[in-house]
Amino acid sequence: MGHTIKEKNKLLARVRRVRGQIEAVERALADERGCTDVLHLVVAARGAMNSLMAKIIADHVRMHVVDPARERGSARAQGAQELIDVVQAYLK
């Protein structure tokens, strides 16, 4: 079973939060709110999307690149964790 299937409910909850943030951007534009307010909403939505992407990438590496049960503590597992850390830092 794939990690997106196992984590389906959590991932869908994140997607719904992103949708809510995008809808907030749309409402702010429709209500002619100031550019600073709109930019803050866009930044929040972008952060939520980046967080979702980082979660999916990290789970992908753990489930499809490195078998955590077999390779715990190995150089390969350490390298995978370093990659995950870099991706997460980049997407923040």
Image (cartoon, rainbow, N blue to C red):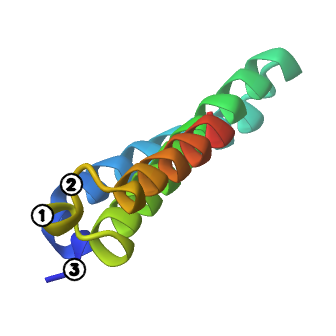
For this orientation, the residue located farthest to the right is: 35
Mark 3 lies on residue = 2
- If you read the primary sequence from the N terminus, does the residue marked by circle 3 or circle 2 appear first? 3
User: What residue do we see at 40% from left, 66% from top?
Assistant: 61
Residue nearer the viewer, 21 or 85 = 85
Question: Which percent across, then down, holds residue 52?
Answer: 45, 51
Question: Which percent across, then down, holds residue 28?
Answer: 69, 30
Q: Secondary structure at mark 1?
A: helix
Left or right: 81, with 72 as reference point: right
Q: CA distance from mark 1 to mark 2?
A: 6 Å
Check if mark 3's residue and mark 2's residue have beta carbons within 8 Å.
Answer: no
For this orientation, the residue located farthest to the front is: 75
Dot 3 amino acid type: Gly
Question: Which percent across, then down, holds residue 5?
Answer: 19, 75
Q: CA distance from mark 1 to mark 3?
A: 16 Å
Mark 2 lies on residue = 72
User: What residue do we see at 70% from left, 35% from top?
Assistant: 42
Dot 1 amino acid type: Ala
Dot 2 amino acid type: Arg
Of circles 3 and 2, the one toward us is 2
For this orientation, the residue located farthest to the bottom is: 1
